[in-house]
Amino acid sequence: MPDTTSNSAAEMDPRSSIPPISLRRRITDHVMTGVAVLTVVLVLLPLFAIFAYLVYKGIGSINIAFLTQTPKPVGESGGGMANAIAGSMVILGIASLLGVPFGIGAGIFLSEYGRNRYGDIVRFVSDVLNGVPSIVVGIVAYGLVVVRQKHFSALAGGVALAIMMVPTIARTTEQMLLLVPQAIREAAYGLGVSRWRTTLSITLRTATSGVITGVMLAFARVAGETAPLLFTAFGNQYWNWKTDQPTAALSLQIFTYAISPFDEWHKQAWAGALVLIILIVGAVAAVRIAVRHGTLAGA
Amino acid sequence: MSNQALPRPRFNAPEPERGPSKQGSKAALKIEARTTPVLQGKVSEIPDIVFGWTMRLCGLAVVALLGLIVYQLAVGSQLSWHAFGWKFFGQSDWNPVEDQYGALPFVFGTIVSSLLSLVIAVPLSIGVAVFITEMCPVALRGALSFTTELLAAIPSVVYGLWAIFVLVPILREYVQPLLAKTLGWTGLFSGPPYGIGMLAAGTILAIMIIPIISSITREVLTVVPQHQREAVLALGATRWEMIRMGVLRNARAGIVGAIILGLGRALGETMAVTMVIGNRPEIAKSLFAPGYTMASVLANEFTEATGNLYLSALIEIGLALFFVTIVVNALARLMVWSVTRGQPARSMA
């Protein structure tokens, strides 16, 4: 063994007593590093391909008409998705109105009242709900709203998306509220502020930017959803502002156009996809900037 | 034990002291209210109670939501359940005209496309996670994880659009002929290369679940205590040996959890799959052949279901899909939690 025959030089530099790493092991090390780099390249490739293709195809089809007109019948060129963009906004607005208060409330429960077994149950259920396929949520909204109203509606679409938003918002709100130092709550209690006031004006206030992040992420997640809207909002070729009538949505329109056999519609689908991505990535990026420079940055 | 001294993920940090200290501070508040003249009057308890119960109600609403989903699906699928019973999942005949419904082709399609996507996605995601946590320069780390997260932000329908116009032609022109030539003898890669079919569905699913698997694997790998790495390195291991013995082995349970979570997503994924799988209720051995999944039959036929039994059969497929994903997700969560909840890492013995 090399270290039993150590001389004075080895005592000065202990590294010299370690046997050299064999060629096979060194090669394996390099090969595995190479494999890891290769996987990164393979994963990033489709991402760039999707974005590049989307911009390349989409940019040529976005124009004023696309953003201001309703779809034209088959065969006629031109037209746009203005009603679908507006419809998406209406549906997402309804979803946010229904989902955000419940989600934040559940998050407050989990962080401030749920440090026990009941909280664990709610925590587990919301994680599980996060994994429910969106199309199943669509069936539930269909049974809840469409069957009762007797027709497809923006409201039904909003309910479906709200169901998907609640668990996500609950969990992120909880995590953000837990980041608020306990001492801040205690300082408020020490001043004689009641618990509900402390929770709303001190704890929630301190974590505002984090909670907004969670809400925006949930929003971004459902903004592109198509499956739960198929048999709730249903889609519409015309303008519609009534919440109890079938309503167009950007994602639905993209789907309809993508599987159609017409070139003109394919172009519109790409343009719609680009608009959708810009809206979503814009929201996510804005959120990241808000987190980095917001009040939570120092917490 | 020595775990306690190491930096923990942020969401674990404040948990232990929370419960008792809050009660302590509330008691302190009551004493203060009685003894100091600074406070004007008594703080009413009623708003506190109302607020507390409103928040508990919101928490309860989450559980109720799950109950509501189960109730809706169970009631909706009654008719089909009484008509077919368990045979529903064993029959491969799907014929709305004669009111005969068997879900086997959809179950088959869902399982095959999901497993295929795992085969493609798992090595890639673990590679990416290992690269980001163990190899990559710190400067690149944030950018890389942000970029992989971006993949998760792309809506399913956009993946589908891209798959129809880019992925499917690539598969048809290059990948499928190559696979047929080299691996055609297995029977898995035979038949005409349409492009559209099970292989396309599996590939696009893989691209979609990579961000999930890799981001959770990354989370699990960062929780592996630093001294495990240092110990293996001190024994003279190369970096790869350190990753294999010190990191991956300790994170096993969490990585498996991440994979199952990806599986859960793949099982329920609808739009992208519907757009490329071919939508034909057939059971074929070849991955080139078109298929159908449980989610995509719902997407395609739910609005067109005319008869009550037809609709009920579709809802039963939804119920089955729901239960499978619930079980898969619950399993995955438990496995990920067992690692990130700061349990002592398994000793290497």
Image (cartoon, coloured by chain):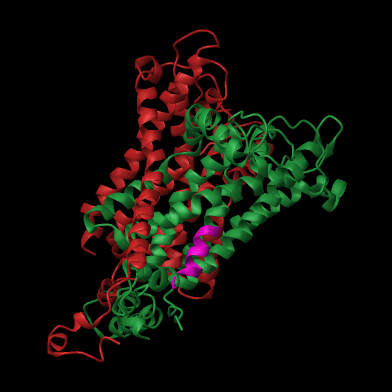
User: Which is nearer the eye, B148 or B86?
Assistant: B148
Percent x, y of residue A178: 35, 68
Q: In this view, does B86 lie to the left or right of A214?
A: right
Identify whether A180 is placed above or below A39. below
User: Which is nearer the eye, B176 or B23?
Assistant: B176
Q: Is residue B314 left or right of residue A210?
A: right
Residue furthest to the top in view is: A76
Query: Which image quarter holds the C terminus of chain A?
Result: bottom left
Q: The green chain is which one?
A: B
Query: Which image quarter holds the N terminus of chain A?
Result: bottom left
Q: Is residue B104 left or right of residue B150?
A: right
Q: Can residue B140 be seen in this view?
A: yes
Question: Which quadrant of the structure image shows residue A56?
Answer: top left
Q: The red chain is which one?
A: A
Helix, strand or loop: magenta stretch: helix
Q: Residue at x 37, y 34 (%)?
A: A51
Residue furthest to the bottom in view is: A4
Q: Is residue A250 left or right of residue B278?
A: left
User: Which is nearer the eye, A186 or A22?
Assistant: A22
Q: Can residue A176 be seen in this view?
A: no
Percent x, y of residue A62: 36, 20
User: Which is nearer the eye, B87 or B349?
Assistant: B349
Chain part drawn in magenta: B250-260
Magenta stretch contains residue A18: no
Percent x, y of residue A201: 30, 62
Question: Which quadrant of the structure image shows residue B290?
Answer: top right
Identify whether B153 is placed above or below B322. above
